[in-house]
Image (cartoon, rainbow, N blue to C red):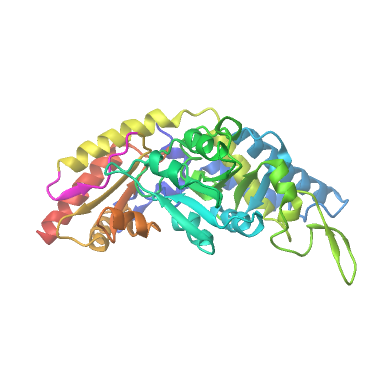
């Protein structure tokens, strides 16, 4: 499978070397189809939505609502009004943290969480289900932590740091058996796995467009209709109201009550184009083959230590190089044209569990190629020579 040529940003040199982009877990590159869809909107259909009766306004509104329906089908939600457009997973989690009402005061999370699915919950008491040495969730711990004070279980579908694929259907069942709702962070799952929220059974599911070949600045919060209808608005202002007086206002039904102000219609159009580009492509087998190659490459390099070995994982390779700070590793690789992520990966508590404060992460995507992993191996040998 060679989808590399669909992505114009990949066809460039960095420091005189061909770009090798291995930072897709931070943000993916965008296919020409997405770039063209956004340009076409601004060239032909740009107008505000839900307000005007002129042709451009009607076309823009139709495109926004078509994107909502396309998202619904992508994750198999039951209804389009269960799809709320937000800026990304961070905003989605904050929305639920502020608007989901309960008299309970504990949030259960996993040790695999990105800061986006941890920090917003810290206004409550956070209880953490740990992981084993492989980086797999301890389901027995999770089950014990869910109790009468649990407000919600918030869990990553896939870890951004280790690539662990959590058993989300089991998580949902454990929580629902005790009458507790579940929010899943799908930022790292949506680009790689088939997501079916009805099969999973979760109450909320969030993902960001920019991780899955779409534009930055837009994401999705799925929520079961009954829950969204019971939640108070998070932001208040234009667009999300029905009637306004000097003293009060009545609010629209979901999803519009959560979409205050002018939406990023062009980004929604780009998200729809990204979903259409993804449609029909079975990328998991391609990425799993590359993951195996990457593990083999890294295991041959002296001093390279991989973090975790989850039983089920996506194409993420997180590692350290003995005696070399991760930022120095990243700088040498950059001079070779290789883009990786270095630092704490917005997962500081998880890294501390594995005895690290900073790491290097190489992450794979639809456009990744075997030669990218060979280049990574050569680059790491250069690191060893430089800091030998």
| Quarter that holds the N terminus | top left
Total marks placed:
0
**In this view of the protein, can residue 255 be seen by the observer?**
no
Segment colored magenta: 301-311
Name the residue nearer the viewer: 326 or 47: 326
**Residue at x-position 65% and y-position 48%:** 268
Across and down, in percent, residue 137 comes to 37, 42
- Outermost bottom residue: 246
The answer to whether 20 appears left or right of 76 in the picture is left
Which residue sits at x=20%, y=39%?
297
Q: Nearer the viewer, residue 219 or 177?
A: 177
Q: Is residue 270 magenta?
A: no
Classify the position of the C terminus by image quarter.
bottom left
Q: Residue at x 34, y 45 (%)?
A: 131
Whether residue 84 is visible, yes or no, is: yes
Work out whether residue 361 or residue 44 is closer to the camera in this orientation and state it. Answer: 361
Q: Is residue 326 above or below residue 157?
A: below
Is residue 307 on the magenta stretch?
yes
Q: Is residue 136 above or below residue 42?
A: above
Q: Main secondary structure of the magenta part?
A: loop
Relative depth, front residue between 80 and 42: 80
- Can you give x and y, in whole percent of width and height, for residue 221 in the image? 62, 48
Is residue 23 left or right of 169 when viewed as pictured?
left
Q: What residue appears at the point 18 percent right and 49 percent down from the top-left corner?
A: 304
Report x, y in % for residue 276: 59, 35
- Residue 365, by quadrant, is top left
**The residue positioned farthest toward the left in the image shown:** 388
Question: Image check: 332 left or right of 44?
Answer: left
């Amino acid at each position: 499978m060679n989808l590399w040529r669909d992505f114009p940003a990949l066809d460039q040199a960095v420091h005189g070397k061909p770009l090798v982009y291995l930072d897709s877990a931070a943000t993916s590159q965008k296919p020409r189809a997405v770039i063209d869809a956004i340009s076409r909107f601004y060239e032909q259909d740009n107008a505000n939505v839900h307000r005007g009766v002129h042709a451009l306004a009607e076309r823009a509104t139709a495109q926004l609502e078509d994107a909502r329906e396309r998202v619904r089908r992508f994750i198999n939600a039951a209804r389009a009004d269960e799809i709320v457009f937000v800026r990304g997973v961070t905003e989605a989690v904050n929305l639920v943290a502020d608007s989901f009402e309960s008299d309970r005061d504990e949030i259960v999370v996993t040790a695999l969480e990105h800061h986006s699915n941890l920090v917003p919950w810290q206004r409550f008491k956070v209880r953490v289900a740990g992981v084993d040495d492989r980086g797999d969730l301890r389901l027995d711990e999770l089950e014990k932590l869910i109790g009468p004070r649990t407000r919600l279980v918030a869990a990553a579908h896939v870890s951004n740091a280790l690539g662990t694929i959590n058993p989300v259907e089991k998580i949902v069942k454990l929580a629902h058996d005790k009458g507790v709702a579940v929010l899943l962070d799908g930022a790292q799952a949506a680009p790689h796995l088939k997501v079916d929220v009805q099969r999973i059974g979760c109450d909320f599911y969030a993902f960001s467009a920019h991780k899955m070949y779409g534009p930055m600045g837009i994401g999705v919060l799925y929520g079961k209709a009954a829950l969204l209808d019971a939640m108070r608005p998070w932001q208040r202002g234009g667009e999300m109201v029905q009637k306004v007086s000097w003293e009060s206002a009545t609010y629209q039904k979901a999803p519009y009550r959560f979409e205050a102000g002018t939406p990023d219609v062009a980004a929604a159009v780009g998200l729809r184009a990204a979903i259409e580009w993804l449609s029909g492509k079975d990328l998991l087998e391609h990425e799993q083959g590359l993951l195996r190659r990457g593990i083999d490459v890294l295991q041959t390099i002296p001093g390279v230590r991989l973090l975790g070995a989850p039983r089920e994982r996506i194409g993420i390779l997180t590692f350290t190089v003995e005696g070399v700070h991760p930022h120095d590793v990243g700088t040498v690789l950059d001079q070779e044209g290789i883009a990786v992520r270095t630092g704490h990966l917005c997962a500081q508590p998880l890294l501390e569990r594995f005895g690290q404060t900073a790491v290097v992460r190489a992450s794979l995507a639809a456009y990744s190629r075997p030669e990218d992993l060979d280049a990574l191996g050569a680059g790491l040998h250069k690191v060893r020579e430089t800091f030998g």
